[in-house]
Amino acid sequence: MNVNNDKLMSLSDAISQFVPDGAHISIGGFTINRNPMAAVYEIIRQKKRNLHLYAHSNGQGVDELIGAGCVDKIEIAYAGSGRFASTCVRFRKAAESGQLLVEDYTNYQMTLRFMAGAMGVPFLPTRSSLGSDIANLWGLSEKARQEDPRIPNQKLVIMDNPFDGWGRADRVVLVPAINPDVTIIHVQSADRQGTARINGLPFADVEQAKAARHLIVTCESVVEDGQLRQAPDQNQIPFFCVDAVVHAPMGAYPTACYQHYDYDPTR
C-alpha cells in the first residue's frame, strides 16, 4: 500500500511495478461498462504472461487479455459483451481448446468472494448455486491448487447450517475470499492522493478494490486536492487503498464510461 501523498504516475510505470508475470490480478467493470481498457492494452504491450485473472462479469477487457495470451487461468461469473457478443469470442475459443482454465461462480458468489477479501475473512456463506452444476463442477484441478498456494484448496464447501435454531438443517455454500495481488479499476475522477469517485453503478469495483494487496486507479480526470472532499459521501475508494493513480482520458474505451462516452460496437 502506497501512503505517499502523490500517487500520480504513468500507466507504463504502474503496470511495470504492480503487474509482474504470474500475478493474480482483478479488473473492474461490468460487461460493456468501465472496463479498464487503457491498462489492459498496456499489459498486452508489456507482454505480461501467466496471469491468473479474476473478474465479476467482464467483457472486452477479459477477452483482449486472453486473446493476447496474457492469461492462463480465470475465475469469473460471466464473460460477454451483451448483445454484441453474448459470450466473449477469445474467451470461448481458449476455454474450448484447453488453453485457458476457467472456474465459474454465480454473479452473487463472485461479489461475496471479493467482499470476503475486502473484509479480511476467509469465506462468506450463501445459498447461491445449491442444486446446480456450479457447485459440482470445478475448473481448477487439485494439481493446479497445490502448485499455487494463492488458490484455495477447494472451489467451495457445502455444509449444514451450524446454527440450527429452528429445527431446520439448512445447507449453505461457503465461497472463498479473493485477495488479488493487484486490482485495476477505471473511474470518472480521482485526486493525486488516490481518493476516487465512481459515477453511476459501481458494480463490484469497490469490493474488488478493497480486497487487493495493491490498487491501480485509472481515471478520466485528476481533480484538485480537496475537491472530492466537498462531497465525501460520493467517494467510494479511500486514498489509503490506492497505490497508483493514472490519468487516462477515454481509459475505458471502447467500453462505456457513464457521463463520458457510450460503448462503441465498431471496436
Image: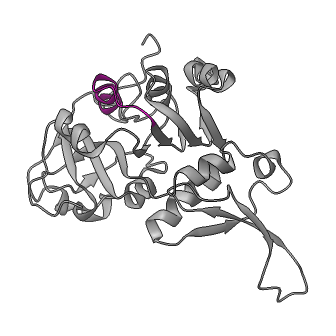
- The residue shown at (68%, 51%) is 142
- The residue shown at (55%, 70%) is 122
Q: Provide the residue span drawn in magenta.
A: 37-50
| 236 sits left or right of 66 in the view | left
Instruction: Report if residue 246 lies within the magenta region.
Output: no
| 86 sits left or right of 71 in the view | right
Q: Work out which quarter of the rendered image holds the N terminus and state it.
A: bottom left
Image position of 31 with respect to 207: above or below: above
What is the quadrant of residue 95 in the picture? top right
Depth check: 227 or 72 in front? 72
| 26 sits left or right of 130 in the view | left
The mark tally for this picture is 0
Image position of 99 with respect to 123: above or below: above
- The residue shown at (62%, 19%) is 93
- The residue shown at (36%, 35%) is 36
Residue 232 x, y percent position in the rendering: 25, 64
| 107 sits left or right of 62 in the view | right
Residue with the most extreme bottom position: 165
What is the quadrant of residue 264 in the picture? top left
- Color encoding of the figure: one colour
Q: Work out which quarter of the rendered image holds the C terminus and state it.
A: top left
Residue 185 x, y percent position in the rendering: 35, 44
Q: Does the magenta stretch mainly form a helix, a strand or a loop?
A: helix
Residue with the most extreme top position: 266
Residue 23 x, y percent position in the rendering: 39, 44
Image position of 102 with respect to 162: above or below: above
Residue 111 x, y percent position in the rendering: 56, 55
Depth check: 48 or 117 in front? 48
Depth check: 144 or 219 in front? 144
